[in-house]
Image (tube, grey):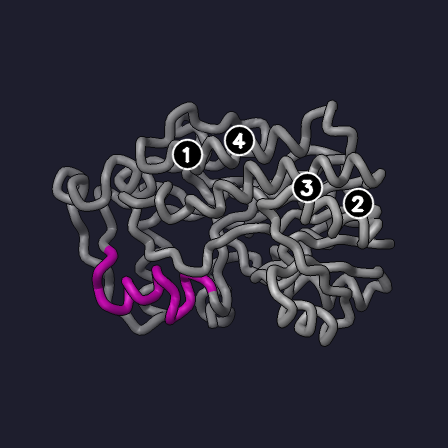
Amino acid sequence: MRIFIAGGTGAVGTRMVPLLVAAGHQVYGSTRHDAGCERLAAMGANGVVMDPLDADSVRVAVAVAKPEVVVHQLTALGSLSGNLKKWDEEFAVTNRLRTEATDHLMAAARANGVRRVVAQSFGGGWTLERTGGWVKDETAPLIADPGKEARATLAAIRHLEEAVTAPEAGVEGLVLRYGNFYGPGNATSREGAIGELLRKGRMPVVGGGTGVWSFVHIDDVASATVAAIERGAPGIYNIVDDEPAPVNQWMPHLAEQVGGRTPMRLPAWLARPMIGEFGVAVMTSVRGSSNAKAKQELGWSPSYATWRDGFRTGIG
């Protein structure tokens, strides 16, 4: 099968390519620079230089690849600081990739007879309605207002999910709501934004720390995406591990693994001026996600079933 990965040299793309090549697929990956083509070639894939925010560039790249499946892995998350008050500001480029670039990819897919589009979304906690049960499946609605710090980011996520899965899109559209990544090179690694804050004792547990997060190892993200390329009905899937967990459980455990002290406790009223309403919600009221649908319909299970084991052996 011919597969085009938009974002082939990104964190997920570079883990997917070897899996797809080993399975016998003909893989094309987009990159912004010629050096990326060399990197893809070394993995057995074909590199295509593409500007994802330029409609003509995207159209040409997809036409060159002539794929049956397009995989949307375009983000710009490499320099996040973890500042919850600047969420939309730090996600500004990624938000354009989730809106403008998604529209360009969908138009190119329709023009070239692409059968299936698999796109990256987010399902680690804060995007979901914060009422009812603490663990949600894919039928749970996105929250109407996540807080002023994250409104543009949620709007971009909503746009991507609707653009890919709408019946009028003309493709088999699958959206994968990835949990919070961990693994080498990600925020929870020893040198990542969260790992560094915990090592330095600068990330407290706010309020009761009852906000529930869902995690997933970066290698499990890649294997789930490969599964969605090959099977599964159109729709939305949560790609997370088996154990959604409140902040008051996972944060002390991660702090220990990265060499930090047990995080201090901070009342919500005292933290609010520093991290904003969105930050307080992330610590106290967000919901986690269930992976039952992905297990049943994609035939996928995470190799790191729980962050408890993954943080100990797989954070990098």
* Residue 140 included in the magenta stretch of the image: no
Residue named by callout 2 = 231
State which tag comes first along the sequence, 1 or 4: 1
Going 42% across and 67% down the picture, which residue do you hit? 189
On residue 105, which mark appears? 3
Viewer-proximal residue among 24 and 300: 24
- Which kind of residue does numbered mark 1 sit on? Ala
| Distance (Cα) linking label 1 and label 3 | 21 Å
Are dots 3 and 2 in contact, CB under 8 Å? no
Query: Quick one: SS at disc 4?
Result: helix
Are dots 1 and 3 in contact, CB under 8 Å? no
Task: Name the front one of labels 3 and 2.
Answer: 3
Mark 1 surroundings: few (<14), some (14-19) or many (≥20) residues within 10 A: some
Task: Name the front one of labels 4 and 2.
Answer: 4
State which tag comes first along the sequence, 4 or 2: 4
Residue named by callout 4 = 158
Mark 2 surroundings: few (<14), some (14-19) or many (≥20) residues within 10 A: few
Query: Could one spot residue 237 in this view of the protein?
Result: no
Q: Which residues are magenta?
A: 186-203
- Which kind of residue does numbered mark 2 sit on? Arg
